[in-house]
């Protein structure tokens, strides 16, 4: 079972120092410190949800710590080494082994990728691959690899980041570029979120602006244009839910004025359906993962005002209602 993490170091004025949170040898109810740009996924190799890195709110420093969720508590584990702590992290569960992708180039260029393997500790596997930065990544259990799509391929003074339409796969040993007959667009790469539909075993890419869905069948992409789509948004989370056997789009912010959204939409492979439930109030910065061991979606967020202080929160969705871990 593999765990892939895309970490992008963007050009900005924030501190680039890396720090590791204080070790928590005993169980903790919350991750510390509170952070943005983090990611989590279930790792069936160890049977726990894994959270890695992010950007600390209080110090604006990048984190390279690893946390495990066992269904009741978080535990910060100590490792002798870890992937570089950068500002954008994406974890994904793979069917071969636990691994982390580490993008460390500046925005607007291809990235020299470090691929790390996690089996309770981090080990560097590959340093030679060169991929676009910020790619969307999802497990492909049918093809027994991991699929990556899109990413930043350049920069325009007028339009900002330019997104590509490349598809790459990781087979547990190396990365290789694929050339499918059909591919999502650059807009899908720019506004997309991606996860794996465990019911079908296919990676699913959703354009947050249009609601258009793309699925990967192991050889090529297929486009699905639904009759009804969720309202346009950004910064949402896409996660599988075993109770609905569907991919669920969680909240986010409005595409124009960045107002918080709390709606939940389920994609059943054919159409979007709005769920009666809502994401807990005030959730804007979030990451989520399906935990099959507890049959819940685990959601992490940092809550606080613009001037702080910020605190970590963990929420659980059981298919009917949300509950906050005290």
Image (spheres, grey):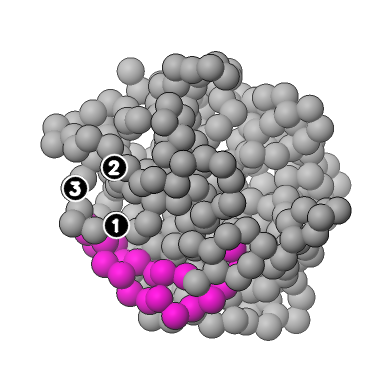
- Please determine whether, in this image, residue 240 is positioned above or below residue 274: below
Residue 170 makes an appearance in the image: yes
Give left or right: position of 271 versus 28: right
Q: Few, some or many C-alpha atoms within 10 Å of disc 3 (few <14, some 14-19, many ≥20)?
A: some
Q: Nearer the viewer, residue 191 or 104?
A: 104
Query: What residue does disc 1 label?
Result: 82
Q: Nearer the viewer, residue 231 or 164?
A: 164
Q: Earlier in the sequence, mark 2 or mark 3?
A: 2
The circle drawn on residue 78 is 3
Report the Cα–Cα distance between label 2 and label 1.
10 Å
Report the Cα–Cα distance between label 1 and label 3.
10 Å
- Please determine whether, in this image, residue 53 is positioned above or below residue 231: below
Give coordinates of residue 202: x percent, y percent.
57, 64
Helix, strand or loop for disc 2: loop
Query: What residue does disc 2 label?
Result: 20
Give coordinates of residue 59: x percent, y percent.
41, 31
Q: Few, some or many C-alpha atoms within 10 Å of disc 1 (few <14, some 14-19, many ≥20)?
A: many
Furthest residue to the left?
25
Q: Few, some or many C-alpha atoms within 10 Å of disc 2 (few <14, some 14-19, many ≥20)?
A: some
The circle drawn on residue 107 is none
- Please determine whether, in this image, residue 54 is positioned above or below residue 79: above
Report the Cα–Cα distance between label 2 and label 3.
9 Å
Region rendered in magenta: 113-133
Please say if the residues under marks 2 and 1 sit with CB atoms less than 8 Å apart.
yes
In what quadrant of the picture does the C terminus appear?
Answer: top left
Residue shown at 54% from the left, 76% from the top: 130
């Amino acid at each position: 079972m593999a765990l892939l993490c895309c970490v992008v170091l963007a050009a900005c004025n924030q501190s680039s120092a890396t720090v590791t949170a204080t070790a928590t040898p005993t169980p903790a109810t919350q991750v510390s410190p509170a952070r943005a740009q983090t990611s989590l996924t279930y790792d069936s190799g160890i049977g726990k949800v894994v959270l890695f890195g992010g950007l600390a709110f209080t110090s604006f420093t990048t984190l390279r710590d690893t946390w495990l969720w066992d269904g009741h508590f978080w535990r910060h584990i100590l490792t002798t080494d870890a992937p570089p702590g950068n500002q954008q992290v994406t974890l994904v569960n793979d069917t071969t082994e636990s691994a982390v992708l580490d993008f460390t180039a500046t925005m607007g260029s291809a990235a020299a990728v470090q691929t790390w393997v996690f089996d309770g500790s981090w080990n560097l596997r590959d340093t030679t691959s060169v991929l676009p930065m910020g790619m969307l990544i999802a497990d492909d259990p049918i093809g027994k690899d991991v699929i990556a799509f899109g990413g930043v391929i350049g920069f325009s003074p007028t339009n900002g980041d330019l997104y590509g339409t490349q598809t790459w796969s990781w087979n547990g040993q190396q990365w290789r570029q694929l050339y499918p007959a059909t591919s999502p667009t650059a807009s899908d790469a720019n506004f997309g979120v991606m996860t794996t539909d465990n019911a079908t075993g296919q990676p699913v890419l959703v354009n947050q602006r249009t609601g258009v869905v793309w699925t990967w069948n192991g050889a090529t992409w297929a486009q699905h244009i639904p009759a009804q789509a969720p309202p346009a948004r950004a910064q949402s989370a896409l996660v599988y839910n075993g109770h609905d056997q569907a991919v669920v789009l969680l909240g986010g912010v409005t595409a124009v004025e960045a107002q918080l959204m709390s709606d939940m939409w389920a994609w059943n492979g054919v159409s979007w359906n709005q769920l009666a439930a809502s994401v807990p109030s005030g959730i804007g910065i979030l990451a989520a993962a399906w935990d099959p061991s507890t049959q819940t979606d685990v959601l992490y967020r940092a809550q606080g005002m613009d001037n702080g202080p910020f605190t970590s929160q963990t929420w659980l969705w059981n298919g009917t209602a949300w509950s906050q871990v005290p």
